[in-house]
Amino acid sequence: MSVMTRALPWLGGIAMILILPHVFSSGAAISIMSLIGFAIIFALSYNILLGQTGILSFGHAVYYGLGGFITAHALNIIAANKLPIPLPLVPLVGGIAGLLFAAPLGWVSTKRAGTAFSMISLGIGELVAACSLILRGFFGGEGGISTSRTSTLQLFGLTYGPQIQVYYLIGVWCLICSGLMYAFTRTPLGQICNAVRDNPERAEFVGYSTHMVRFLAFCIAGFFAGIAGGLAAIHYEIVTSGVVGAGPSGFVLLMTFIGGTGFFIGPILGAILLTAMQSLSDITGAWLLYLGMLFVLMVMYAPGGLAGLLLMHRQVATRQGLTRLVPAYGFAAVPGLSLFAGIIFFIETSHHVLVKSAEGMQMRLLGFSYEADSPTAWGLIAALIVVSYLAFRRTWPIVATAWTEATVGERSVPDDSKPKPPAKANVDGSASNSRSTITAAVR
Amino acid sequence: MTNAPALKLVDLHKSFGVTPIIRGVELAVRQGERHAIIGPNGAGKSTLFHLISGRFPLSSGHIWLKGEEITGLAPFEINRRGLSRSFQVTNIFPRLSVFENVRCGVLWSLGYRYSFWQGIERLRDARERAEEILEQINLTARRDIPAGLLSYAEQRSLEIGITIAGGADVIMLDEPTAGMSHSETDYAVDLIRKVSEGKTLIIVEHDMGVVFDLADRISVLVYGQVIATDTPERIRSNAAVQEAYLGTAEHADE
């Protein structure tokens, strides 16, 4: 790869950060994009553990949250003593806090891998969450710790009062941290992390202490999680005890997994999607249900995550491949979308009946007005779901066939690392005779 | 130091629960020799390998590597002192490329340890050493393929490549030709002879052809004890060995 192609995604990222606030300039949009910025750092740091080193933590928000609390305290101390520390450097305090907490806790928990590690991380997470309610001085009890980002030393006339200035601050940190974490994947330790993920026993027999490798990965992940937490504290100007709990720990796992743990870009995609989905909470009270459904679907049908799906398509993104795939997708999209609409109607109407019945049964959804408890509405919803499901099932083989034809066309450039398409194309067969067997298998 | 045996085992014992598997093994492997360990199934050959390489803790006894006691050390500590091993069941990094597999094997010995401040692609010595080994094990053409997709025989070669990558001077191979065809076995024996040049080789092997072809000396392990250590010719004519092992070997060979 030339320097240019390697630099391209980063230049694209910089351009996005610069351009997006001009495209989506509303206050709410800039706020969401700020959230996405530190969610990306948080999810990437989590993937150092999950994707790179192969350890599943249920307590990563501990380092994110503690980074946030220490940052909030640091901001208050800086303001009270008028210390000459400008705001842009303060997230580093969160990072160092994350690192300092990750070191002792990580030393204990990384002694084991696999299920034992996950259980220990869960236990530590619960322990810190319990402490956050008991140690009121540090965690601020129910009210949390409030702070102000505008009372630090101001450089270049930047007050960091307006959200857009905070957005750019987060954007710069997001770029720096992503760059560093990417660079980390291409270091000796970064590679040995992969080796430990693949085969810890073998790693021991080429001279590496798997405990030390996992420990160092844990510390680095804690450091970046702390930076993300620090940026969150600066963004919200308040940190409450909830951030160290199981909720955020689970959410970062969802972001990373849905995005795709096997690819560097995966957690970035997951952070963008899930943070954007969080804003669905303004539209529907059942948004967590949609999130849960998405997670289950991804686990079952696309374990490579969004990044896996994208990469799978990049393999066949030739004109020949696309001429086969696009019509098939278009064909499947009609019943697919109507099935999706049917599920939305079902969930929202149920939600209305179960949760919002006090407001009356009249509801509006996707341009339709109807009574949530009318048998006709329920009958139509059921019919929509059943009919679209049956139709969708019939279109699926068409997509599968298109897939195999598109991939067979690509045989001249074999790349075995690609995720398997739905039709389970063979890996080693020769081009000429594999086509007939595949299509036969699909039918 | 130079006169110390490459590997010395003194009164090694290992029990799993109340079942003794290794019952007082005594063995001295000379520096630079090719030493085969043979014995009927269940004699404890693989367990002995696991004990020497630190994978299992000892019940009692002592192990010296080149004059230095390594009893009770962790696998990575033993590896860093110059003992490297392969496994009976293929043990590679399946999602890393063939080249990366070998490079993981050379990193520690070149002093890169846990470095996270150097770009791995810029480490010329690591790349050159890994390429050299790929050339030796004849997998240069497959260097960018995920190791999990190699054929079985190729994975066995890669396993040997990872084992020798760190430059250890005591190499232990656990049934390197198990499950191979005749031609693959011949190839593997040539490879083993080539890569163990100037090193101490300890090999567990069921294929008697391979053993008598390759080994300078042979130790026979029966029910957790070494009943004889000698040259191939003398082992062949040893009455106790014939009774305990070779008499059944023709049938147990496969």
Image: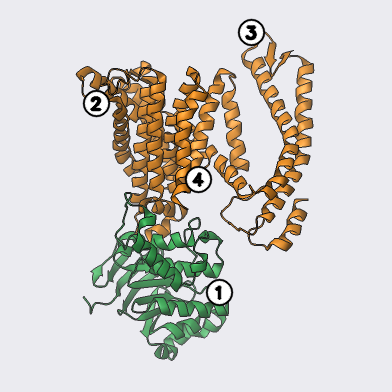
Chain colours: A orange, B green
Mark 1 Cα-neighbour bin, 10 Å: few <14, some 14–19, many ≥20: some
Check the image and report above or below for A141 versus B82.
above
Do pointers 1 and 3 mark residues of a single chain? Answer: no
Mark positioned earlier in the residue sequence (3 or 2): 2
* Residue linked to disc 2: A85
Mark 4 Cα-neighbour bin, 10 Å: few <14, some 14–19, many ≥20: some
Amino acid type of the residue tagged 1 in the rendering:
Met
* Chain for disc number 3: A
C-alpha gap between disc 1 and disc 3: 74 Å
Mark positioned earlier in the residue sequence (4 or 2): 2
Q: In this view of the protein, which residue sits in the foreground, A301 or A269?
A: A269
Amino acid type of the residue tagged 4 in the rendering:
Phe
Label 3 or label 4, whichever lies nearer to me, is: 4
Q: Are marks 4 and 2 in contact (CB under 8 Å)?
A: no
* Chain for disc number 2: A
Going 41% across and 20% down the picture, which residue do you hit?
A: A163
Do pointers 4 and 1 mark residues of a single chain? Answer: no
Label 1: which secondary element: loop
**Which disc, if any, is residue B180?**
1
Label 4 or label 1, whichever lies nearer to me, is: 4
Q: Are marks 3 and 2 in contact (CB under 8 Å)?
A: no
Going 40% across and 41% down the picture, which residue do you hit?
A: A179
* Residue linked to disc 4: A263
Q: In this view of the protein, which residue sits in the foreground, A12 or B121?
A: A12
Mark 2 Cα-neighbour bin, 10 Å: few <14, some 14–19, many ≥20: some
Label 4: which secondary element: loop
